[in-house]
Image (cartoon, rainbow, N blue to C red):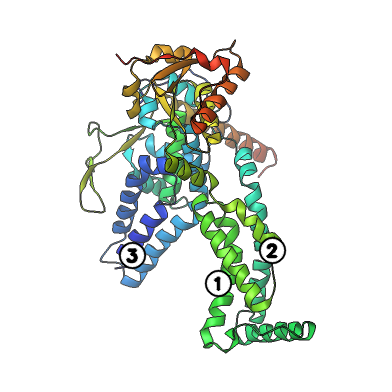
Amino acid sequence: MLGRLLTRLYSHLLKLYPDRFLDEFGEEMGDVFALALSGLDDSRTPPATRRVKMARLFFREVCYFPPAYLDARRYQVSLGAGETHAGRASYGEGEVTEAWVGRRAPWGEALIGALPFLLFGLAYLTPGLSKLEAAVSDGWATTHNLVSILWLKWLELYLYEPAFQLPPRIDALPFPFLTLGGLGVILFETAFILLVLLRPARPLLALAGVGFHMGNQLFLHISFTSLMVAYVSLGDWTAMGRGLYRWFKRRELVVLYDGGCRLCRRTVALLKAADLFDQLVPVAGFSQDPGRGRYAVVTDEMLARDLHVVDGERVGRLRMDRGSNTAAVAACLADALTAGVANRPHAVPECRGFASLRPS
Amino acid sequence: MFNQDLPVDEEVPPGLTPLREPTLFILLALSKGRKHGYAILKDVEALSEGRVVLSTGTLYGALARLLEQGVVRKSTDDSGGDSSGSKSRSGSGGIRVRKYYELTQFGHRVLEVEINRLSTILAMAGRGLGEQGI
């Protein structure tokens, strides 16, 4: 019974890992966890001890989730767009050699990316810890104390603003309601800084945060208008942009690149990061990328020399060697992107060198 | 699968060592031969005498990094010695092929460099303590 529950909870925990990491290791992780659980199923162990051990096993997974998530995220980022590990590995020795040369994303970069969210989290952590301390030492979260706080606040508001009308009488609700609310506030404020580091949790946090502040406004007339504006940063605007793109069905731009070339992978990763409307479709050469077969007319040898762009029926080359004009390449890609969104012809001269794509 | 290993005389690049403790124990577990995830987990616990107990997240996060660095490789075929068999029963009851991990030649070299590094430190510490008569 407990084993089944923990296996189910673990499968939910697994879903929080990045997609490509999950594709590569998700099944194995599920199997290993199930094996570890069944390893505890020893008839000689008293049931209570067994249950504690099982719970501890799951608790360990939860505790080590944040660093493991960062490892998984780094793995996903370093894979680049459209690649899988098996796909890259087929490239052979070159890939292995390249794999260890300064491949790990530095912690500094990850920290810089997380910094705005950590600062946001700190705004909650301090009052959260303060309430936690007060709850432990002075019973802050008890119904009696919370009712006192409500009454005091209402009295202040009443004296300050004679026209003020009392909010709904939450002080008259049954016993556990306010205590649960108080504990919920402590949990929300202290856990916010950790949860905000997980991208999938951010929209939910924004909803919970707005709800929390609206509740404060309604019951205590405390408005956090300036903080509520900050919740805009928790929206997944890229996902929304991509949703819009799919909605309008704009044309896509296929970028064929050498999957074994670090510079090309990083370039494509940068372009994908800026691709708000999800218009770029990266396809890796020298790999088992499933989309590769559609563009067999652009051979791997061609990709070893140039990055190629396929726009509908036309294919163009973008030189990426040492003598290439980076500004022209960037301008061309920007032009191709905007042309795709606006459904207009290409304006930048460098992009007019597209030849017709004639699949062989 | 990686087609070829790095030559053993290849220098271990800076930044790869020192290894973190869980990573070192994972490599030590794999130095005895190829293993699947659960066997690595149990071996690490046994080798460290219960001091290092890995979560699956830590294990696979580390394996992902080691695969990337070319230190370990993954295989799914059932050749090679592992008495526990090569198939596992999935949570949903289906049979799926078990995946194995093993050290590459480069991985052996990394482990050797790390063990040498630790031995040097230990020897230096021993000498230092000896001079103080401890």
| Distance in Å between CA atoms under marks 1 and 3 | 23 Å
Disc 2 target residue: A225
Q: Quadrant of the N terminus of chain A?
A: bottom left
Q: Provide the chain ID for the residue under circle 1.
A: A
Nearer to us of marks 2 and 1 is 2
Number of other residues with Cα within 10 Å of mark 3, as a class: few under 14, some 14 to 19, many 20 or more: few
Q: Mark 1: which amino acid?
A: Gly
Disc 3 target residue: A5
Give x and y (percent) for residue A73.
49, 42
Mark 3 vs mark 2: tell me if same chain: yes
Q: Mark 3 or mark 2: which comes first in sequence?
A: 3
B39 or A348: nearer the eye? A348
- Seen in the picture, residue B82 relative to B51 is either above or below; the reply is above
Q: Secondary structure at mark 1?
A: helix
Q: Mark 3: which amino acid?
A: Leu
Disc 1 target residue: A184
B26 or A272: nearer the eye? A272
Which residue extends farthest right?
A160
Q: Mark 2: which amino acid?
A: Thr
Q: Quadrant of the C terminus of chain A?
A: top left
- Seen in the picture, residue A72 relative to A2 is either above or below; the reply is above
The residue at 25%/34% (across/down) is: B81
Give x and y (percent) for residue A23.
36, 41
Number of other residues with Cα within 10 Å of mark 1, as a class: few under 14, some 14 to 19, many 20 or more: few
| Distance in Å between CA atoms under marks 3 and 2 | 41 Å
Q: Provide the chain ID for the residue under circle 2.
A: A
